[in-house]
Amino acid sequence: MEVVFVLIIMGIMTAVAVPTLRRSVVERGYWRQAQDVLLTIYTGERMYFFRNGAYYNMTDPNDNVQWRQIDMDNPNFAAVAFSVSAAGIGPGATFTATADRGGGLTRTINQGRTFGGSWPQP
C-alpha cells in the first residue's frame, strides 16, 4: 500500500513538473533566438555605419527593403515568437534594436553592443 501511495505522489509531481520544465526550455529557446537576431542586427547596423557614416533608421519593421539596407532578411516574417525593430538616430549617433516578446518582455541591443530590456535570461 505504501508503494502505491509513493507512486501516486510521484505521478502527481511529474504531472506538475513536466509542463513547467517544458515551458522553461521553450522560453529559453525564444530568448536565445532573440539574442541571435539582435546580434545579427547589430552586425548589419555596424556594416551600414561603416559604408554610410550613420546608422540606418528603419521606419517600418515590416518592410523587407528596409531590412535589406542592413544586409538581412526581415526576421518578423520568420517563425519567431517575438517582433523585431531597429532604429538609428542622427548621423553616426546611436541605434537600438528591440525584440518584443509581448507581455512587457523586451530585449534590446545598442551601438555599443550593450544588451538591455526587461526580458531576463530564463
Image (tube, rainbow, N blue to C red):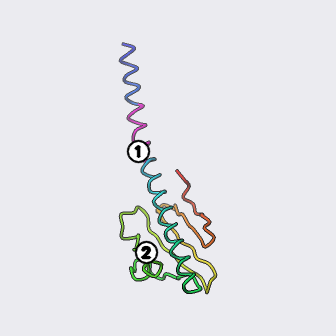
Q: Which mark is residue 95?
A: none
* Residue designated by label 1: 22
Nearest the eye: 20 or 43: 43
Instruction: Answer with left or right where residue 11 lies relative to residue 70.
Output: left
Instruction: Answer with left or right where residue 55 lies relative to residue 76.
Output: right
Instruction: Answer with left or right where residue 73 lies relative to residue 97.
Output: left
* Residue designated by label 2: 72
Amino acid type indicated by mark 2: Met
Crowd around label 1: few <14 · some 14–19 · many ≥20 (10 Å): few
Q: Where is residue 53 drawn, in percent x and y?
A: 59, 86
Q: Write the start and end of the magenta stretch as one range.
A: 13-23
Secondary structure at badge 2 equals loop
The residue furthest top is 1
Q: Are marks 2 and 1 in contact (CB under 8 Å)?
A: no
What secondary structure prevails in the magenta region?
Answer: helix
Q: Quadrant of the N terminus?
A: top left
Q: Where is residue 95 drawn, in percent x and y?
A: 58, 76
